[in-house]
Image (tube, rainbow, N blue to C red):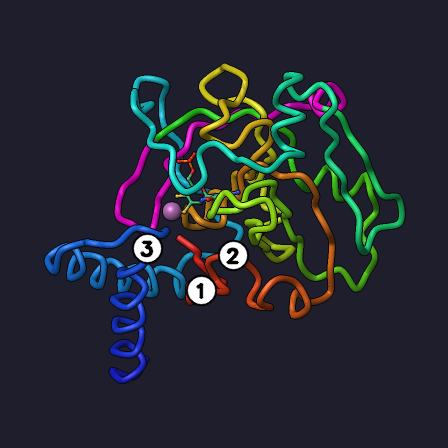
């Protein structure tokens, strides 16, 4: 690695800091801390294989006050209608480059093999929290739908717009097939043994444990397999990516 590339990386991280997850006002020492952490992260990316497992924790280590962040109570009318009914009418759509598109209720999801994991969430703003998540492996659903050979990414379309406007740009994210098929990548419908609460993404959110917080799409309505995300949103692969964040946010 040459020094110039490290420096460019550090500056990139510092710039990102200023608008981390939509909040402003981090002080300079916090910026410096995140800069050095960014360097550590970059170094780790070179060393740790993509399919390595994220660390897991014990029940005793679960954070009593896991912080909700970003959207915490979507205002979109389609979401409110589903929420009013306890998400009984909710359907997760899996489509795009698949042989057999899926439309699954929460009961359908809960009827499939479940996976539970206790992991640490790492937000780019500089805080972490530990929780237990239960859900279905994303890989299992993708295999059920039958990915076409040209599917390269999985896009998560969400209900929420961060500006809470009906016509606002809705959150979305994307990951590649390495993360999609990672053994800890799940669509979680439960948190700490309870139904997933609205502030944390009810009824369904992604856990993609080798990535930073903003990749963990909450309020998922549709999962689309694509060969490119250039034509989705601003074309950078996610709501925050369209606003300058890195698409690859591996940890
Ligand atoms: N749909 C949606 N997903 C989202 C966000 C959001 O605003 N909307 N914020 C992201 C960010 S920046 C973080 S840190 C986590 C926060 O998850 P939590 O609310 O469970 O803490 O959700 C991520 N997923
Ligand atoms: Mo975040």
- The residue drawn where x is 41% and y is 42% is 70
**Extreme-front residue of the structure:** 166
- The quadrant holding residue 110 is top right
Q: Is mark 2 within 8 Å of ligand 1?
A: yes
Quick one: 225 or 179, which is closer to the camera?
225
Span shown in magenta: 106-129
Q: Position of residue 168 (x, y in %)?
A: 56, 51
Please say whether residue 117 is one of the residues in the magenta stretch: yes
Q: Secondary structure at mark 2?
A: loop
Give the crowd class for mark 1: few <14, some 14-19, many >=20 residues within 10 Å.
few
- The residue drawn where x is 57% and y is 62% is 237
> N-terminal of the two: label 3 or label 1?
3
Q: Is residue 169 above or below residue 4?
A: above
Q: Is mark 3 within 8 Å of ligand 2?
A: yes
Give the crowd class for mark 2: few <14, some 14-19, many >=20 residues within 10 Å.
many
Give the crowd class for mark 3: few <14, some 14-19, many >=20 residues within 10 Å.
many
Q: Is residue 235 left or right of residue 42?
A: right
Q: Position of residue 32 (x, y in %)?
A: 15, 62
Where is mark 3, residue-wise?
A: 20
Q: Is residue 171 above or below residue 57?
A: below
Cβ atoms at labels 2 and 3 below 8 Å apart: no
Where is mark 2, residue-wise?
A: 239
Quick one: 174 or 185, which is closer to the camera?
174
Q: Is residue 170 above or below residue 199?
A: below
Q: Position of residue 21 (x, y in %)?
A: 36, 51
Please say whether residue 192 is one of the residues in the magenta stretch: no
Cβ atoms at labels 1 and 2 below 8 Å apart: yes
């Amino acid at each position: 690695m040459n020094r110039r590339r490290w420096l460019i990386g550090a500056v990139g991280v510092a710039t990102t800091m200023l608008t981390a997850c939509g909040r402003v006002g981090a002080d300079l020492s916090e910026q410096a801390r995140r800069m050095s952490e960014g360097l550590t992260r970059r170094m780790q990316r070179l060393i740790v294989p993509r399919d390595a497992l994220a660390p897991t924790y014990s029940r005793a280590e679960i954070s009593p006050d896991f912080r909700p962040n970003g959207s915490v109570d979507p205002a979109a009318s389609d979401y409110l209608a589903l929420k009013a009914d306890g998400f009984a009418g909710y359907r997760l759509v899996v489509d795009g480059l698949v042989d057999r598109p899926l439309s699954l209720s929460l009961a359908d999801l809960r009827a499939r093999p479940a996976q539970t994991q206790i992991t640490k969430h790492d937000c780019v703003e500089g805080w972490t929290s530990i929780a237990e998540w239960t859900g279905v492996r994303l890989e299992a659903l993708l295999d059920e739908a039958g990915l076409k050979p040209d599917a390269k990414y999985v896009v998560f379309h969400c209900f929420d717009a961060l500006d809470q406007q009906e016509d606002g740009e809705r959150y979305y994210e994307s990951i590649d097939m390495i993360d999609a098929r990672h053994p800890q990548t799940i669509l979680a419908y439960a948190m700490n043994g309870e139904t997933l609460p609205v502030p944390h993404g009810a009824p369904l959110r992604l856990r993609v444990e080798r990535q930073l917080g903003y990749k963990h799409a909450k309020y998922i309505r549709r999962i689309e397999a694509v060969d490119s995300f250039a034509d989705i949103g601003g074309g950078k692969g996610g709501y925050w990516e369209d606003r300058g964040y890195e698409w690859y946010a591996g940890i």
